């Protein structure tokens, strides 16, 4: 699996957009980018995933660069409830045996008043 | 609503005890996983199962075993608990990987071995 690099921590003011970067310079053509987050004392929660096109859902937007070597997760209007550790993961989208996810150490996002 | 439940939120056991951690999902998912999470190390996969009675080792299976007798239930067993198994244990499930890699996680069990 491709390795990812994320900043260890970031701050964001409530109501502002939170932009969380992820570097995955060794990503290969069949690997997707996934984002999860983990709020304190809870299990991880799926946010969004994409291959090469930008994606948006009710939680966030995912912007993937044209060369696919990096991506940015955007929380458009961060709230205090978005304070969490955010994980960027790359993984092949293939059939076969179970879908193992390899989590790194993520980015700790602190949303402040 | 999607649900993965784990038998305990907090557990304290003594060294050498046999420990069972239970996980149940109500989504009819094929795949189930056990991870442990430790500060500075992120989540590490212990074992996973892609079908009833099927299991595969993850990255750190030593000292653990698993059981999947029914589709909805996946158990993690510590045959003889040791202090280095003190950790947060997370269970997850997902549909067949041909459809999605979205994994649904339980709330976790914080195990302390003394």
Image (cartoon, coloured by chain):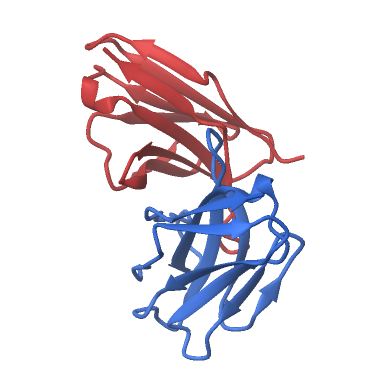
Chain colours: A blue, B red
Q: Locate residue B94, reporting x and y percent.
A: 58, 49
Q: Locate residue A58, reporting x and y percent.
A: 77, 61
Seen as rendered, the residue at the extreme front is A113
Q: Locate residue B85, reporting x and y percent.
A: 27, 26
Does residue B39 sit above or below A51 in this rendering? above
Quarter of the rendering containing residue B80 = top left
Q: Is residue B59 visible?
A: yes
Residue found at x 59% / y 59%? A12
Does residue B37 sit above or below B108 in this rendering? below
Residue found at x 55% / y 61%? A35
Q: Is residue B52 visible?
A: no
Quarter of the rendering containing residue B14 = top left
Looking at the rendered structure, the number of numbered marks drawn on it comes to 0
Q: Locate residue B57, reporting x and y percent.
A: 32, 44
Image quarter where the N terminus of chain B lies is top right
Residue found at x 37% / y 67%? A5
């Amino acid at each position: 699996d491709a390795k990812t690099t994320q900043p260890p921590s970031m701050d964001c003011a409530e109501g502002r957009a939170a932009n969380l970067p992820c570097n995955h310079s060794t990503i290969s053509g069949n690997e997707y980018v996934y984002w999860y987050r983990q709020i304190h004392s809870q299990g991880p929660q799926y946010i969004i995933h994409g291959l090469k096109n930008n994606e948006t859902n009710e939680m966030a937007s995912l912007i993937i660069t044209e060369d696919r070597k990096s991506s940015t997760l955007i929380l458009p209007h961060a709230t205090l409830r978005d304070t969490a550790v955010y994980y960027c993961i790359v993984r092949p989208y293939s059939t076969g045996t179970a879908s193992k996810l390899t989590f790194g150490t993520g980015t700790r996002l602190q949303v402040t008043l | 609503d999607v649900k993965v439940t784990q038998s305990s939120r907090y557990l304290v056991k003594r060294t050498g005890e046999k420990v069972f951690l239970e996980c149940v999902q109500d989504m009819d998912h094929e795949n189930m996983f056990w991870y442990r999470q430790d500060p500075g190390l992120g989540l590490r996969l212990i074992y996973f199962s892609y079908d009833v009675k099927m299991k595969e080792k993850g990255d750190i299976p030593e000292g653990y075993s698993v059981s999947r007798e029914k589709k909805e239930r996946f158990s993690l067993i510590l045959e003889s608990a040791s202090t280095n198994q003190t950790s947060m244990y997370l269970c997850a499930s997902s549909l067949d990987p041909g459809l999605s890699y979205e994994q649904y996680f339980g709330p976790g069990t914080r195990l302390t071995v003394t």
